[in-house]
C-alpha cells in the first residue's frame, strides 16, 4: 500500500523537469496521476514510463479557462474527482525591465499566476468534496525563490511568483477548516531543460565556458550546485501526505540555504 493510494493527482506542466519528477514521485507513492500540458509527446513518453495509473491530458493550456475545463472533464473520465492538485506549469523568460514588453509581461503573468488561478478554481469543488469526506485534499503550488526575493532581469517572473505565494496564503486560510491544505514549494535554480537552455545561450552569446555560465545559476546556492528536480518532488510528496496535515499556507524554500529577503 502506498501512502497516496486512493488519490487522484493532477499535475500541470508534467512533461519534463520538475513536473515530471513530481509525477513520478506521486505515482510511485500510489496515486493515480493525470499528466497535463500543452504538448502530447513528452506527456505520452512519461505515461509510457509510468504505466498503469497514469493518464495524459494534452492541449491543456492553463491560461485558457475553457481548455482547463475540457481537460478536467477528460481527467474525471479516467480517474474520477481530483484530490491532489499540483500547479507546476510555468515559464521564466528573462529581459531587462525597460525591455520587458507588455506582451512579455502579460504572457508570464498569465501562465505563472493566472494559470494557477484557473486550474485551482476549476478543481476546487473536487478538493472540497474530498476534504469534507476524508480531510486529506491537497494543493501544492510550485513557486520559486523568485517569489521570496528579487532577481534582476526577471521582473515579470518575480512578480508572478510573488503572486503565487500570496494566493497560496490567502487560499490556505479560506480552506483551513475544509480538509484542504494549500502550500507552495520554492525551488532555487534547478537542473531542468530551462536552465540547460539558458546556459547554452550564455555560452553562445558571451563565449564563456559552460562552467562559467553555469556559475551564474549556482553562485546563489550556498551548496554551490543546482537543485535536483527529485529534491523538489520529495518536498511535494511530503506535503501531499497525511503527515503534513498541519502544514498550511507555507512557502518552503528548496535552495540549499540561500538567504532570501523577508
Image (tube, grey):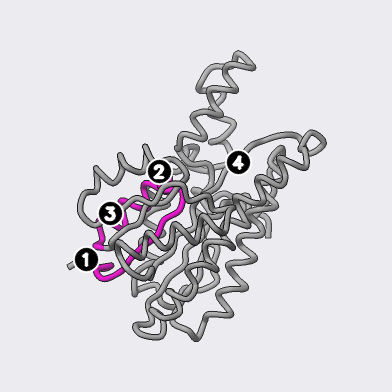
The verdict on residue 26 being magenta is yes
Distance between the alpha carbons at the discs numbered 2 and 3 = 12 Å
- Of callouts 1 and 2, which one flags the residue occurring earlier in the amino acid sequence? 1
Q: Secondary structure at mark 3?
A: strand
**x then y, percent, for residue 71:** 44, 57
- The reply to whether discs 4 and 2 touch (Cβ–Cβ < 8 Å) is no
Distance between the alpha carbons at the discs numbered 4 and 2 = 16 Å
Q: Secondary structure at mark 4?
A: loop
**x then y, percent, for residue 144:** 56, 51
- The reply to whether discs 2 and 3 touch (Cβ–Cβ < 8 Å) is no
- Of callouts 1 and 3, which one flags the residue occurring earlier in the amino acid sequence? 1
- The reply to whether discs 1 and 2 touch (Cβ–Cβ < 8 Å) is no
What residue sits right under mark 4 in the picture?
92
Looking at this view, name the residue that lies furthest to the top.
207
What residue sits right under mark 2 in the picture?
15
- Of callouts 4 and 2, which one flags the residue occurring earlier in the amino acid sequence? 2
Q: Which residues are magenta?
A: 3-30
- The reply to whether discs 1 and 3 touch (Cβ–Cβ < 8 Å) is no
As drawn, is 239 to the left or to the right of 117?
left
What residue sits right under mark 3 in the picture?
54
Amino acid at each position: 500500500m502506498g501512502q497516496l493510494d486512493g488519490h487522484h493527482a493532477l499535475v500541470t506542466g508534467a512533461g519534463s523537469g520538475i513536473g515530471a519528477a513530481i509525477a513520478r514521485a506521486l505515482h510511485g507513492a500510489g496515486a493515480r496521476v493525470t499528466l497535463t500540458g500543452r504538448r502530447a509527446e513528452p506527456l505520452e513518453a512519461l505515461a509510457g514510463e509510468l504505466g498503469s495509473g497514469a493518464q495524459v491530458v494534452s492541449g491543456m493550456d492553463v491560461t485558457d479557462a475553457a481548455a482547463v475545463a475540457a481537460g478536467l472533464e477528460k481527467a474525471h473520465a479516467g480517474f474520477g474527482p481530483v484530490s491532489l492538485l499540483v500547479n507546476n506549469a510555468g515559464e521564466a523568460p528573462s529581459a531587462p525591465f525597460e525591455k520587458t514588453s507588455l506582451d512579455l509581461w502579460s504572457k508570464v503573468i498569465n501562465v505563472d499566476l493566472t494559470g494557477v488561478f484557473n486550474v485551482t478554481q476549476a478543481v476546487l469543488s473536487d478538493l472540497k468534496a474530498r476534504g469534507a469526506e476524508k480531510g486529506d485534499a491537497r494543493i501544492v503550488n510550485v513557486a520559486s525563490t523568485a517569489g521570496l526575493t528579487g532577481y534582476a532581469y526577471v521582473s515579470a517572473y518575480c512578480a508572478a511568483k510573488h503572486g503565487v505565494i500570496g494566493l497560496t496564503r490567502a487560499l490556505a486560510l479560506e480552506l483551513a477548516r475544509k480538509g484542504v491544505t494549500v502550500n507552495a514549494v520554492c525551488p532555487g535554480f534547478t537542473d531542468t531543460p530551462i536552465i540547460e537552455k539558458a546556459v547554452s545561450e550564455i555560452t553562445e552569446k558571451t563565449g564563456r565556458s559552460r562552467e562559467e555560465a553555469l556559475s551564474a545559476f549556482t553562485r546563489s546556492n550556498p551548496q554551490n550546485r543546482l537543485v535536483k528536480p527529485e529534491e523538489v518532488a520529495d518536498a511535494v510528496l511530503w506535503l501531499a501526505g497525511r503527515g503534513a496535515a498541519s502544514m498550511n499556507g507555507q512557502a518552503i524554500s528548496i535552495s540549499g540555504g540561500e538567504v532570501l529577503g523577508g
